[in-house]
Structure formats: structure tokens, C-alpha cells
Amino acid sequence: MLRLILTRIFLGCLTLFAVTILIFAATEILPGDVASAILGQGATPETLAAFRIELGLNRPAYVRYFEWLSNALQGDLGTALTNKREVLATITPRLINTLFLAGYAAVIAVPIAIFLGIVAAINEGKWIDRAANIVSLGAISVPEFFIAYILIFIFATNLGWFPSLSTVYSDMGFWQKIHVVALPSITLTMLVTAHMLRMTRASVLAIMSQPYIEMAFLKGLPRNQVILHHALPNAAAPIISVIALNLAYLIVGVVVIEVVFVYPGVGQYMVDGVSKRDLPVIQACALVFGGAFVLLNTVADILIIMVNPLLRNSR
Amino acid sequence: MTNNNSFRNPTLSAEIGMVILAVFIICAIFAPFIAPFGEAESVGKTWLGPSSKFWLGTDNIGRDMLSRVIYGARMTLGVAAICTCLSFLIGVTMGLLAAVAGKIVDQVLSRFVDLMLSIPILVFALMILSMFGSSLLTLIITIGVLDSFRVFRLARSIAVNVVVTEFVEVARLRGEGLWWIMRHEVLPNSLPPMIAELGLRFCFNFLFVASLSFLGLGIQPPFADWGGMVRESGRAISFGIPAPLWPALAIGLTTISVNMIVDWILSINARPSGASAEM
């Protein structure tokens, strides 16, 4: 089991390395020339040449890649081209904000979704299952910003319970923060709950159709005992991967939501960087998102190995 | 005969979905004849509420919301449809190639796709669009290529099961080329399960285009598109003006209708042929 886990960690590191290459390739090699992309079409050849030297673009790509990677590993993400500020100093508080929002949504969404997903699977075909199906299908079909604007319209504009802009400061108290960030968090919660509920339901149902479950029923065990002792331990692995997949989804969903609510997180930083063509900012944000994605998937795989009853007892 | 019957009688929700989708498609094709005002024409004061002249009110520079929603159907639906076709063209071709052309090609293509899917797709698209700029062509190619990785996975997994059948073996022994086998043996047998996927990928691409436009990196003004319209009128909602809700509602209705139709198609495919008596 330990060997499996170590292999998985090694694979995760390998993927992360590949992701850094991909980010670098997508932003620096593909278009051919970053300098002309940043300066635009109006730039004269002389300014372009000077700018290329300033960026260090006259050196070969692999040299620049390893320089960028070793700097990033030492915590130096470069300086933003537009305001000449350290990217790391800007991105750190924003990353904390994003993690706060994502964590806030996850703490509400995960227990609700797992509980409802299991309830829906147990009552397959009954009204509660159908209601959960229709509501969750609706929630995943509409764009994130639609849910966000409807919530703003009801709870901020008409009822005035929460602010429509989620501006947070570092000296804000915890409960004040919880109140200000309520609307974006509820939006994310609704989206993630819908996805997670459907996937949990499907994986529990897949297990309920296994022969050993039928055997347990034929032994004459009551229904809730079959579910608690036979189905759920085996459903743990798929449910963990559902949670991980959705937390990864949360990271991406956060981008649009942060823009709607003008929330100072990494997603908004990236969108700002993209519209200003600020290369170091884009690379750093992509690195953060890509890294989080790989990390979550690796952790999920390790957890699945650990809860697998077949692997737990062997060494 | 019973099977045809189920095609003629879609479920109620599928019928509703088809009607809504048909209305939007008609709006997209005949926009200049249906819309009361022009696409980029300022016709009244800014931020007017709904009235008999402007059914959905006006936007931030006094353009008629209803006309823009109608014109917006063109860009939003059109771009998403083209992206989906492109992604299927690339994804299915590569998927079938991976299944037919042997282990090495399969490994190379599959590992490459695994790598491409290890970065969130929105983050990937943002990186590429920031470098190439968001012209319509770049947008379509970016989304089409990024989405083709997911089509590839499905197409490959279906085609792998077709490749091991006797008729492919016979074609190989007959000396047919790779391309011929892909085109005449594997493709026709892989397509039916992919029809539902076509609808789902369309939904995904449609929401993706809308999200990118909402972030200001998708379809650019002066073209009206639903995601961009939400962006332009977004802040007005704090003042109680429901303007951003209309284009957002149009986006939601489209995806829900396509999903309802897909559910119906899936229910036909899942049923063994001739067993549709309960419909």
C-alpha cells in the first residue's frame, strides 16, 4: 500500500512538472513573440527589439524555462509588467481570499450534497429523488453568473440582507467576512452541491446493483442495515473521488464568481492580468490553479487507496 | 416499428425543449426581421424599465434589450455550434486513429490528452486568449481544440470496442488501409452512442463561450452576444434594474432545453430495440 501511495505521489510531481512546461509553452513559445503581443501592432521594430532584451527573449526558450522554474520554486514569481509590483506579494493575500471563499462553500456543500445524494439514491424513483434530480439539473444547466445575479437581485437589491459587492479587507473580523462573502459562497455552494449530489447518487446506485448487496437483502437484513454496513463502506472510494473532482471544479468556478462579486481573489487577478496581457501575472495564476488541480487529484487518489478494504490489510 | 414510434413521440420535456430551441434558432436566423430595433442602435434613454415600446427595457447606452437578445442568439448559438463541430471533427478523428492505429499511437495520443486535461480548461483558455487576443477565429479554434480532448476520450473508448469485432478483422485481412477502416467500419458503428454526447458538448461549449464573453475575453463588441450583454449591464442589478437577467435567462433556457432533448435521446439509446412498448 505504501508503495502504491509513493508511486502516486511521484506521478503527481511528474504531472506538476509537465504542467509547468505546458504553462510556459502556452504563454511563451506558442505565439512566437510575447513582446509584440504585449506592445501591440503599433510598436516600431526598435522598441520591439529593446523590449525583447528587457524581457530576456533573445535567449533560447529552454534557458528561460529553467530560469523561470527555479525562480518560481524559490518563491520568486517575477514582477508584474503593468505596475512593477512583486507578483508573489500580490498573489498571496488573494490566494488566502480565494481559499477562504472555496473553503466556505465546501464546508456547506460537501455534507449537504453527500447526505442528499445518499437519500436520493435510497429513495430512487420517489418524489424526493425526482425533486433532487430536477433542481440539480436546473442548477448545473444555467451559467454561474445567472444564479449569482438572481441571488443579488433577491437578497441584495430587494431584501438588502447582504451586500452585492464582496469587498473584503485584511482587518475585517471573521463574522463580518462571513457576512460579506455570503452571496458568492451560496452561489458556489448551489453549483457544487448539484454536481456532487448527482455523482454521489449515481455511485451509490451503482453499488446497490452489485451481487453482494442483493445477497445481503436475500439474507433478510433490513434495508438501512444493508445500506449502512454493506453499501456505504464500498461507496466511500467513489464518493471521495466525487468530492475531489468537485473541489477542483470549485477552483475553476471561483473565477467567474469572483468577477461577478468583485471579490479580490486569484481568479479576478488572472482575468485582470489577461485583459492587460501581463505575462508574469498570468503564468503565476495559472501555476496556482494548475498546482491546486493536480494536488487535489493526487490527494484524492491517495485517500482512495487508503480506504480501499482490499488494500488496507495487505502491505 | 415500435422503435420508430418512440422517435415520433418524444417525451413532454423533450417537446418543450425542442420548442424553446426552435424559437431561439428562428430568432438567430431571422433576427433582422423579428427584432423591433437594430443590433447596435441607441433608441431611447439609458436603463429604461420594461414598457410597451421596449419590452425588456434598454441597456447602458440606450439600446433595446429585446432586439439585442434576439440578435445575440446569432453569435452565441452560432459560435458554440461551430466550436462543437470543430471539436467533434478533431476529437473523433484522433479517437478513432488511437483505437485503430496500434498501441504506440494510442499511448502517445492518450498521454498527451491526459496532460492537456491536467490544467483546468478555463485557465488554459484564458492563457491562450491572452496571448493570441480574442478574435472570433482564435476563440473558435481555442475552444474547439480544448474541447476535442474530452471528445477524444469518449470516441476512443467507444472505438476500442468496435475495433476488436470480426468485421474490422475481416477488413484488415482484406488489406484495407487505416483510413478506410476508420471511415467505413469504425465510424458508422461508433456514432450512435455519440449523438447524446454531441448535445452535452454543445451545452458545455455554449456555457464556456458565454462565460468567456462574460469575462470580456470571448465575443467582442459591437456584436451582441448573451454573455457579453450580462457583462455590460451587470452592475445595474445593484440598483434594482433586472437587465442582466434577460440574456442570462436566455442562456439558461437554451442549455436546459438541450439537456431535456439529450435525456430523451439517451432514453431511446439505453432501451434495447423493440422494447419501447411502455412509451
Image: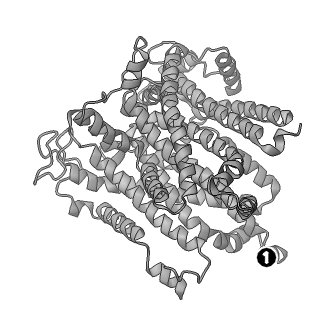
Q: Mark 1 is on which residue type?
A: Ala
In x, y percent, where is residue B253? 36, 56
In x, y percent, where is residue A56? 60, 18
Seen from the viewer's position, the closer of residues A140 and B230 is: A140
Residue A165 visible (yes or no): yes
The residue that label 1 is drawn on is B171
Q: Is residue A210 above or below residue A33?
A: below
Q: Is residue A292 above or below residue A239?
A: above
Q: Is residue B116 above or below residue A106?
A: below
Task: Spot the residue most to the bottom.
Answer: B1
Seen from the viewer's position, the closer of residues B196 and A156 is: A156
Q: The numbered mark 1 sits on a residue in which chain?
A: B
Displayed quadrant of residue B119: top right
Q: Residue at x 65, y 43 (%)?
A: A241
Residue B145 visible (yes or no): no
Q: Residue at x 67, y 52 (%)?
A: A225
Q: Is residue B117 left or right of residue A107?
A: right
Q: Secondary structure at mark 1?
A: helix
Q: Residue at x 22, y 48 (%)?
A: B65
Task: Spot the residue most to the right.
Answer: A315
Q: Quadrant of the N terminus of chain A?
A: top right
In x, y percent, where is residue A207? 68, 56
| Mark 1 closeness class: few <14, some 14–19, many ≥20 residues within 10 Å | some
Displayed quadrant of residue A217: bottom right
Q: Is residue B159 left or right of residue A249?
A: right
Q: Is residue A186 left or right of residue B132?
A: left
